Amino acid sequence: MRIILQDTFGRSFPNDLDNVNLLIHASNPNVIEGHISVDKKYLTLKAKSEGTSLVKLYLDDNPGIYDVFYVSVGSIIKPVSPVKVHVGGKI
């Protein structure tokens, strides 16, 4: 996911904030883990098991500035549209 920093009115900051250090915390680390890219522009989430978790992204210098979102991990992965396989084909 792309990380975009915004103010309280939803306006994006005009400059890249290279000196801003973000940290990530999952309320249920058995379900999901997250990593922030070196350039601080992308958040990668990796599902570890089925379940739910809250993910908190916050400033290292000021943990009171944060965002939280809900993640649900299911046991079945299914495509958005039907997959068609020819007779004798393999997936």
Image (tube, grey):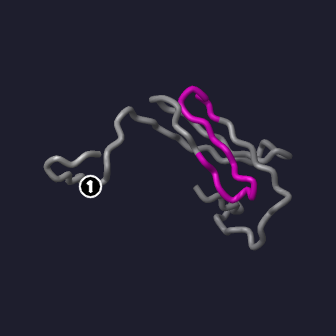
52 shown above or below 70: above
27 w.r.t. 42: above or below? above
**Which region is colored magenta?**
26-44
How far across and how far down the image is residue 62, in percent?
83, 45
As shown in the figure, which amino acid type bears the numbered disc 1? Ser
Residue found at the very far top of the displayed protein:
30
82 or 63: nearer the eye?
82
Q: Tell me where residue 20 sits by quadrant.
A: bottom right
* In the rendered image, the vertical position of residue 15 relative to residue 84, given as above or below: below
Question: Image check: 19 left or right of 81?
Answer: right
Occupied quadrant, residue 73: top left
Q: Is residue 42 magenta?
A: yes
Q: Position of residue 30 (x, y in %)?
A: 57, 26
The answer to whether residue 34 is magenta is: yes
* Residue count near mark 1 (Cα–Cα under 10 Å), binned few <14, some 14–19, many ≥20: few
Where does the N terminus fall, quadrant-wise?
bottom right
Q: Which residue is mark 1?
A: 81
Which residue sits furthest left?
87
User: What's the residue at 75%, 53% (across, down)?
Assistant: 38
- Residue drawn 80% across the image and 63% down it: 17
How far from the left and from the top, in percent, is residue 7? 71, 62
